[in-house]
Image (tube, grey):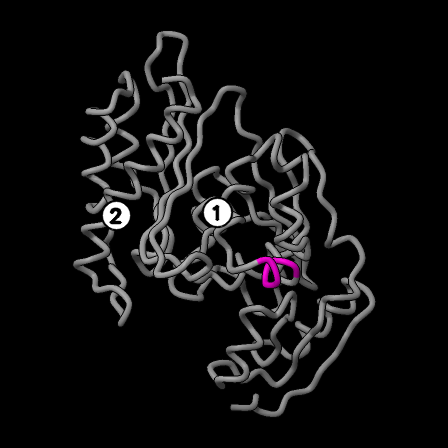
Amino acid sequence: MKPAAFAYERPGTLGEALEALARHGSDARPLAGGQSLVPMLSLRLARPALLVDLGRLAGLDELVVRNGAVEIGAMVRQRRLERDPLVTQHVPVLAAATRYVGHPSIRNRGTVGGSLAHADPSAEYPAVALAVDAEMVVRSARGERTIPARDFFLGPFTTTLAEGELLVAIRFPALPAGAGWGVEEIARRHGDFALAGAVAVLERGPDGTCSRASVALFGVATRPLRATAVEQALVGRVLDSATLREAAALAADAIDEPLSDVHGSATYRRQVTPVVVRRALEAAAARAGF
C-alpha cells in the first residue's frame, strides 16, 4: 500500500520543530529514523496530516556522560550504541540489548528516541530504560519536563507524551562498579521482535548477598514491566542456581495483560517468561561475581 497524503516539514531548529508540533497538535507526527513509522504509514495504520522531519536538528545526536548518567540525544542512531565506548563502559546492558534490535541496516537508521517514543511492547529499549530507571527528557513549546521510565510507557504504542511534546534525550544511569547484567529473549528469528524477553541488573553487597535486583520484561504484555516479585525474592540472598531458578519462576505473575498473537499465545508467553528471566539472571549473577 501507499501512505495517505500528508504535508511535510523539515525544520532547521528545535524551536521550529516544536512550533510545528504545537501548531498541528495530534495531526502531526515527528519523523526520526523512520524504521517504525514509515511501515505504519505504508500500511495506513498511521495517517498524520503532517510529518515533522527531525533530521536537521542540531544537538539531538549528542552522547555525553553527565551527573552519573549517560545522556543520549533522541536522534542518536542505534548502531552507535553498540560501539560507543561511553555506552559500553557505563551502560553495557544497553549496548548488549541493541544487538537484538533488527539488523545492522535497520540500526544504522533507527534512533534510540524513536524506538522509545514508539513504545512497542516487544522492543528492547523500553525494557532497558525501565530496568536501569532511566529518565526521559521531553520538550514542547511550553517548556521542558523529565519523566521517569516507570511512568512513561502506558500501553501498546502509547506513552505519557502530550500533544506537541517531543522526546529530546534519555538519561541512562551508569551501572555501579561490579554490577552484573543480562539480556535474553526468544524470537522466531534473530532481529524479529521478541516473543518474550528479560533484562536483569544485579548488585552484590559486601556480605556476598544480593543488595539490589532489577528485572524488566518485554514482549509478553502490553507494556514493559518490572518483575517486582522476582526482585524481592533475590535481595538479601546468596544467588546460587537454585535461588535464581526459584526467583525466575515468579516472573509470570508480573504479566497482568498478556500479549497473544499468531506468533505466540498468552499461555506460551507465560510459560517461556521464567526461562528468559532465569537466563538473564544467570548472566547477570556471573558478571556480578556470585
Residue 104: quadrant of the picture: bottom right
- Of residue 170 and residue 37, the one placed in the foreground of this image is 37
Q: Main secondary structure of the magenta part?
A: helix
On the rendered image, what quadrant is the C terminus found in? top left
Do the residues under discs 1 and 2 have CB atoms within 8 angstroms? no
Question: Whole-percent x and y of residue 85?
Answer: 68, 35
Q: Residue at x 57, y 91 (%)?
A: 4
**Callout in the foreground (1, 2):** 2
Of marks 1 and 2, which one's residue comes earlier in the chain?
Answer: 1
Instruction: Using residue 260 as the reference point, say whether residue 180 is left or right of it.
Output: right
Q: Is residue 132 above or below residue 105?
A: above
Question: Whole-percent x and y of residue 269?
Answer: 23, 56
Instruction: Using residue 66 as the reference point, say whether residue 121 is left or right of it.
Output: left
| Residue 273 disc label | 2
Instruction: Using residue 124 as the reference point, say whether residue 54 is left or right of it.
Output: right
| Residue denoted by label 1 | 149
Instruction: Using residue 219 as the reference point, say whether residue 31 is left or right of it.
Output: right
- Magenta residues (range): 104-108
Kind of residue sitting beneath label 2: Thr
Q: Is residue 110 above or below residue 73?
A: below
- Of residue 195 and residue 138, the one placed in the foreground of this image is 195
Q: Secondary structure at mark 1?
A: helix
Q: Is residue 173 above or below residue 37?
A: above
Q: Secondary structure at mark 2?
A: helix
Density class for disc 2 (Cα within 10 Å; few <14, some 14-19, many ≥20) is: many
Residue 2: quadrant of the picture: bottom right
Residue 105 drawn in magenta: yes
Q: CA distance from mark 1 to mark 2?
A: 22 Å
Q: Residue at x 19, y 39 (%)?
A: 250
Kind of residue sitting beneath label 1: Ala
| Residue 218 disc label | none
